[in-house]
Image (cartoon, helix red, strand yellow):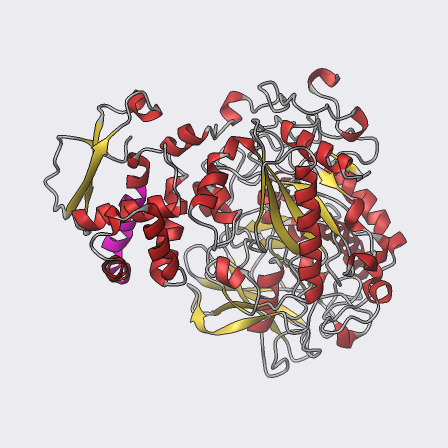
Amino acid sequence: MSTMSPIPRRSFLAVSGIVSGLLVAGGPLSLIAPGRAWALEMKVLTSSQGGALMSVARTIAPHDNLEDAAYALVVKAIDAAAAADEHVRSLVAAGLAGLGGDFASLTEAARTAALKAVEKSAFFQLLRASTLANLYSSAIAYAHFGYEGEAFSKGGYLTRGFDDLHWLPEVPLQDSGPGVGGG
Amino acid sequence: MVQIAHDDSDAIVIIGSGAGGGTLAHELTRRGIKVVLLEAGARQSLASFSQNPGEAFAQLTWLEPRTTSGSWTVREDYPGLPSWTCKTVGGTTVHWTGATPRIRPWELRARTTYGHIAGASLIDWPIEYAELERYYDHAERRLNVTRRHGNPGLPASSHFKVMYNGAKRIGYKQVHTGYLAVNTRPADDRGMCIQQGFCVQGCKTGAKWSTLYTEIPRAEATGHLDLRIRCRALRIEHGENGRVNAVVYHDESGQELRQRARLVCVACNSIETARLLLLSESARFPHGLANSSDQVGRNYCRHTAGFVWGVFDQPIRFWRGTTLAGIVEDETKHDPKRGFAGGYHLELAALDLPSLPLAGFPSTLWGRELGFLMDHYERMAGMLINGEDMPRATNRITLDPTVKDSFALPVAHIHVDEHDNDAAMRTHAQRQGRAIYEAVGAIRTATSRQTPATHNMCTARMSKNPGDGVVDEYGRAHDVPNLFISDGSALSTPGSANPTLTIVALALRQAEYITRELSARNL
């Protein structure tokens, strides 16, 4: 969790807004994070914009058992992009305003319909791309989805289960090749 | 390493160090010919390859902008990355999956085999299969391809077991772990495959052939190679006699330099090769170098491509194992009864977690369907369609009228309207792919649309008739006797095979030809 700070640390840098939450007890993150509470301090987005973006990200890529902290990384990336580029900042602000102040409190069906209506917009494409690029690339996501990531340092999977599927028949040798030790 | 003087008018200059340029550089230098090899990218190594997918992408990819138009779905799904090519020593041989099927004999006679197809610009290759076959053999031995010349295949991964059993159950016969330039045992100073699944980020054992750690260091060892990295070619110049005589490039420090040349070989991957020729316009070649036929940049092919995904109720963990070690060959035939000309391969394909939603699904996919698929990441199987697409004169690379790169030069603009034949083939292939997974109990299947092109071909194609293409059967420009094209641009038609093996075979053949012509003082 190097990308977010545990509460109650507050930075002396200018902070525009905050999104925060609690890690799920017993979840993969709670084992590696320094505390259960987390907070994301944003540079340019307001707390309510951050909350709405969390909700947009969850509507674009819904995973009921994936904790908010994973979605906060999407908000963090959008906040950073907005801080670096005035165009992004106004695109996000206008897009969120268009969704209405109560977007985060709508039902999922209503949120989906609202986003469907703006699906072709630059705002939605930015949020979709940002969500996909940041939600699945974190250590949180690797743990949640069971992805093992880098394997070279562990010797790959040649002797660690690259062929351990047994619910289908094996492939005859002429269509595959010799395994470890030539067998 | 030799240093060749900038004013040495005997220099052979190769632009691009990938499958074509890297192989050609080795073949010429080992015969004692001095070569300047210009490479726009940096030099990585087995140790420096990043295993973080996002970092690896940034480390290896050509990131200068390209623009796109046309009715193809890539314009909608990947407007910022219509093509995915590399900028690094070794080029796309660092990033490729190692898949080395051959173009089929009848595919070399595409125009004759398929007949006239409205809206397509098919031609036959100027080379007979029997001739190309000799170089395929040579290339396969060079790359140490599995399942060829007595080599065993790679062992079957869990992921391949799913493809294999499904394909067999729906009646396919030619299904196996593929022809791959991947060592099953240490050989040729390269390591062996440890089934780690990080093929396209740069293979850290070197099991997968790349010019980065084979042809290029061997060329350096001859003492005849002057490799200049982070050097971007800007234009090729010619003399009053119409022969090329220099390459102007930017070096790492931003200095503009001019390398005199006796011979120039362009191998920048199809899009940039066409762009460089177009940028090299002059009073004598007002439409671009070697472009009196107006064929430079046209007939752009990228293979009919796309993913098919199957979701199962049991774990597969498809990221474990050689990414592309599985192939179905049965559909590479030409059988018009299927409703289209040409054929396709189905190839095993997995994506790492961060890349799957970005590269594996269309931009229209989001919400619960996306959530469902990603929730089943451990239980997914995947395959990639790789089919012959129809060349069209209007599918072409041009210079963008407004967008400039970091050298203030117009970027490549890619226009593609898919031919109906491509769409019919994709529909057929997606149906067959889904059937494979359903035959072994898939609870859901999904497909992507066309993916960003990693196979870029035919933009400076070989042709018997100079009016139909840009180069002859040896890759020598019809218009300019000492200018050669040495990459996938020169393919006359795309065929249904991943292009690298063919590019290497043609480079081996071209190297023999250049050597012969140089010693006969014809060049």
Return the residue nearer the eye: B445 or B300. Answer: B445
Picture quadrant where residue B316 is located? top right
Residue A157: x and y in percent read 58, 23
Task: Examine the residues drawn in magenta and state their main secondary structure.
Answer: helix
- The count of marks equals 0
Residue B390: x and y in percent read 71, 64
* Image point (48%, 36%), residue name: B48
Task: Judge whether residue B78 can be spotted in this image.
Answer: no
Return the residue nearer the eye: B282 or B295. Answer: B295
Residue at the far right: name it.
B130
Residue B52: x and y in percent read 45, 36
In reply to whether residue B520 is colored magenta, the answer given is no
Looking at the rendering, the stretch of residues picked out in magenta corresponds to A73-87
Residue at the far left: name it.
A12
Return the residue nearer the eye: A60 or B224. Answer: A60
Q: Is residue B54 left or right of residue B481?
A: left
In the rendered view, tell whether residue B69 sits above or below residue A128.
below
In reply to whether residue A80 is colored magenta, the answer given is yes
Quadrant placement of the N terminus of chain B:
top right
* Image point (29%, 23%), residue name: A30
Quadrant placement of the C terminus of chain B:
bottom right
In the rendered view, tell whether residue B36 sits above or below residue B180.
below
Return the residue nearer the eye: B292 or A54. Answer: A54
Residue B182: x and y in percent read 68, 34
In the rendered view, tell whether residue B167 sits above or below residue B393.
above
In the rendered view, tell whether residue B253 sits above or below residue B246.
above
Task: Judge whether residue B334 can be spotted in this image.
Answer: yes
* Image point (51%, 21%), residue name: A154
